[in-house]
Image (tube, helix red, strand yellow):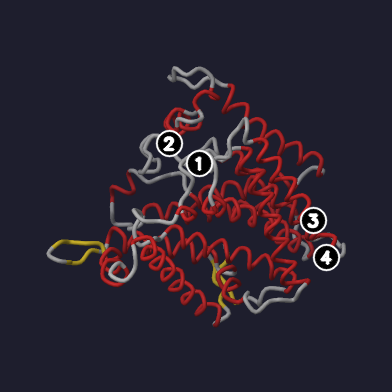
Amino acid sequence: MTSVASEAPRERLLALDVFRGATVAGMLLVNNPGTWGAIFPPLEHAAWNGWTPTDLIFPFFLFIAGITTHLSLSGRRARGATESDIRRQIIRRGVMIVGFGLMVGVFPFYDLARWQHVRIPGVLQRIGVAYTLSALITMRGTLKQQVMVLVALLYGYWFAMTLIPVPGADGGIGANLLDAPSRTLAAWTDRFLLDGHLWVSSKTWDPEGLLSTIPAIGTAMLGVFTGRWLAEKRPLEERLNGLFAVGAIGMMIGLMWHWSFPINKSLWTSSYVVFTAGMACVILATISWIIDVRRVTWWTPPLVIYGVNPIIAFVGSGMMARLIYTLWKVDFHGKQTAVQAVVYQSVFAPWFEPRVASLAFAICFVLFWYGILWALWRRNIIFKV
């Protein structure tokens, strides 16, 4: 990671920074409740099939990464970078993002057990892989060829997950096993290749596993296509109308696809890709309409501050959460208790009913990190990969 002083975001990117900032802040909000036993339903992931607002955060972040990929690489080309220079930059960034994900996975670094059983899949790892492959794919060929690759990824994943028999399972083809998290083809692939290095909460499968990363590449590619549309030299209203229309169609297609291949975040199903990308288009267009057409910007600075330093927010908050939720313990009523639980039980739980207290803690966590990011922003420090 490099630390550089950067100019403030250009006005044409303000809506994108606001969208990214809202996504990052939402991630911190849902990942850090006061207690996992008392959470409002919209702040939880869907149990399996279906979606909640929480299930939109990760694909939105990946979709936004696709948009910024196009804008960043276009800027480099305009400054005279060669295609080989750009490819090296893409690969370097992808490797660094994956490295940061693995770094969070082995924190604290002195725990040898974490090194031996480090979770190889992960959120940043998926972002790094999907970013790299989507950027390399969309560097070459025509738009038609790239769309064909996207279709092949989404349909190929659908066919593989539903038509291929899962080894060792007695349910026949994969379509009969989609409701059993540990028996899907994706779960079998995770165990076959990464057994012992999966998400500890599931053990037999991983929500960011290998096979389900294939359609995630499609999410990033759809972001790249959106970035191209936003960069078109057309009137803003025309571009926003296009985003609204395509987004609405994408949501409709995703909901229809749900009938045969259910919307599912953990499997990153093809219907989930199309539905969430469609919703991202609609939300981005709405934000841009409010900011750039209606000129209502008084509410944007806090989200911009979150949006310009997403890596710091992700990595830093992840390490802090592990520290206060599990590693740092103090004596509390004669028992060694995690600092987070002590704060929650002492400050929040006595005043509110459990779900409100849990949400209040999460909001304070978000505000704490806003303070850190604000201090960096005030010094004009932007951390970029």
Secondary structure, mark 4, is: helix
Report x, y in % for residue 234: 87, 62
**Relative to 10, is 149 above or below?**
above
Return the disc, 1 or 3, that comes first in the chain's sequence. 3
CB under 8 Å between callouts 2 and 1?
Answer: yes
Q: Which residue is under mark 1?
A: 266
Return the disc, 2 or 3, that comes first in the chain's sequence. 2
The label nearer to you, 1 versus 3, is 1
* Front position in the image: 286 or 98: 286
Report x, y in % for residue 200: 35, 43
Which quarter shows the C terminus?
Answer: bottom right
**Relative to 369, is 163 above or below?**
above
Secondary structure, mark 1, is: loop
Q: Which residue is under mark 2?
A: 205
Return the disc, 1 or 4, that comes first in the chain's sequence. 4
Return the disc, 2 or 1, that comes first in the chain's sequence. 2
For disc 4, the neighbor class at 10 Å (few under 14, some 14 to 19, many from 20) is some
Which residue type does callout 1 highlight?
Answer: Ser
Q: What is the C-alpha distance between the residues marked 2 and 4?
A: 44 Å
Which residue type does callout 2 highlight?
Answer: Trp
For disc 2, the neighbor class at 10 Å (few under 14, some 14 to 19, many from 20) is many
The residue most toward the right is 234
Return the disc, 2 or 4, that comes first in the chain's sequence. 2
Q: Residue at x 72, y 73 (%)?
A: 10
Report x, y in % for residue 204: 39, 34
Return the disc, 3 or 4, that comes first in the chain's sequence. 3
For disc 3, the neighbor class at 10 Å (few under 14, some 14 to 19, many from 20) is some
Q: Which residue is under mark 3?
A: 229
